[in-house]
Amino acid sequence: MPESLNLHKFENLSPFQIKDELIKLAQKEARQMALPYLNAGRGNPNWIATKAREAFFLLGQFAMTEAQRHRNEPQVGLAGVPQGPGCYDRLKAYCSKSVEGNGPPGAETLVAVVDFAIEKFGFTPDDFVLELTDGIVGDHYPMPDRCMQHNEAIVHEYVMWAMCAGHRPDAKFDIYAVEGGTAAMCYIFKALKNQRLLNAGDTIALGTPIFTPYLEMPVLEDYGLNTVDVSSKEEDHFQLNDDDFELLSDPIVKALFLVNPGNPSSVAISPEVMTRLVEFVKTRRPDLIILTDDVYGTFIPNFQSVMGHLPENTIGVYSYSKYFGCTGWRLGAILVAENNIFDKMIAEAPDETKAVVNARYETLTPDPSSFKFIDRIVADSRDVALNHTAGLSLPQQVMMTLFSLVELMDEEKTYQKFCWGILKHRFDELVEGMGIEVPDNPLYDKYYGIIDFEFWLRKYVGEEVVEWIKENVHPLDISFKLAQDHGIVLLNGSGFDAPNWSARVSFANLDDSAYRQIGKAVRAVATGYVQAYRASKGLPLHG
């Protein structure tokens, strides 16, 4: 690493900001050395789910014919809005004509998902199709503001399939459709503060390593929270241990925030630890607020979400972005069980606190005390005054509906299994390139990987080398060396509260062939550190 590049100036930056500097270095190296530029730092996949999209675009064309039935002024490009009576039959006829005429793809899928939903959920055909056609043209504000009626039923079933396949709870969840997991985080933090469920100076526990914004948001002036880590380590297979539960037993810890499966660890909570967590909360901490971000749960067979086991205590967050290849769509959901501790905490707050909090919603309801926590999240997301225009855009909700239905119909899970296969192959390529052996872990989703130099160097070359690296190598050197010497971008693990001498690799966003090359580059960097250690001790470079 050149003397001119001062790594200390990057120490306080988020890995997503450091990434920009790494990209510059990697692109420069790739150009100069005629190497491929490989950015495995971002998590968006390089695949997309096609069936729901094909149905979506065909539905949009049908919706235009529906709007033009009511009024059509083609000379100026103006039409009416879709109408309900008979729209189901018209959709069937439109799709049949498309199939017979060898029209655009998606007709068979569109008819299949509509009929599937009508039968499974008992929908009135015209009402459901009108929600789709009116929604996709986007002429109205979302109504209800939380989630369209039919979409909520469908998303609820999909999330139970995706997040609670291994343990479906006996609970009904209210759903707020939001602009991806990003918006969910912002809205939840704001609502917890506004309800005085978390106040400045309160302490929350973070299940680290964790997605960087969960480290950065609590300490902003907006929230002023203290954080403690329940740190899952590689040697513990990234599971909570005795020390973590002891920390959570302290009532000063008001909340536990988790990403499950982890980011960047990509390891899900084990059934044994889940059982222990449930018993712990029910017997020792029934007041513990839990937020679980489960975006990667679809990459674990029979995944079990915390919200499936502890629905009363848990705010669930799910994003469609990774599984369906739709990060640009911004599709997500906040889930709160109908029976939950949040409504109880608000109701049992001191009278002075209740008066202040309830006054916030006096313009929305004659009885603010009965205003549910989930509806307060919605209102707070639009600073209350704009509650009447709250909600995820209707075309986005239609896309959620179609993604969910296509997946619910796939009883053989062919799409899901194919996605698993992509990630496994890329993981295997990286491991072979690194020249290491990694035991199989059914709780590891292989979406990301933490390359922990400290762990692997200790295993293969010994403690002395590890200690020398800690004393002589800056933690960011790993990511910068990969960028500058190999044209490869990996995010620094320290930015996720992962081990300092580590890097995060995404297995989702590059072609399969790239990962063996990344593995070889990582091995070369590690070999360079070992050789530097041996040279410092006057030992032969190879030995």
Image: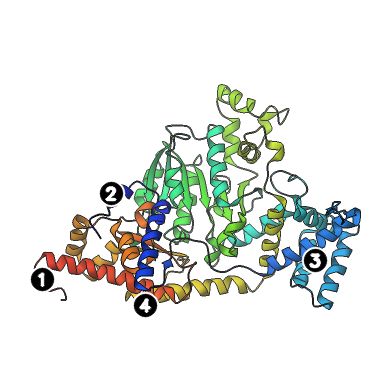
Position of residue 338 relative to residue 437, above or below, is: above
SS assignment at label 1: loop
For residue 432, which numbered disc appears in the image?
Answer: 4
Position in image of residue 80 (x %, y %): 86, 51
Mark 3 or 2: the one toward you? 2
Q: Looking at the picture, which amino acid does disc 1 mark?
A: Leu
Q: Nearer the viewer, residue 247 or 109?
A: 109
Q: Residue at x 10, y 65 (%)?
A: 537
With 531 as the anchor, is 44 left or right in this view? Answer: right
With 495 as the anchor, is 467 left or right in this view? Answer: left
SS assignment at label 2: helix
Q: Which residue is mark 2?
A: 8
Q: Earlier in the sequence, mark 4 or mark 3?
A: 3
Farthest residue to the top: give it: 352
Position of residue 241 relative to residue 438, above or below, is: above
Q: Which residue is mark 1?
A: 539
Q: Nearer the viewer, residue 361 or 255?
A: 361
Position in image of residue 467 (x %, y %): 19, 59
Q: Looking at the picture, which amino acid does disc 2 mark?
A: His
SS assignment at label 3: helix
Q: Earlier in the sequence, mark 3 or mark 2?
A: 2
Distance in Å between CA atoms under marks 3 and 2: 59 Å
Q: Residue at x 57, y 73 (%)?
A: 417
Distance in Å between CA atoms under marks 4 and 3: 47 Å
In the rendered image, which quarter contains the C terminus? bottom left
Whether residue 410 is visible, yes or no, is: yes
Q: Which residue is mark 3?
A: 115
With 111 as the anchor, is 329 left or right in this view? Answer: left
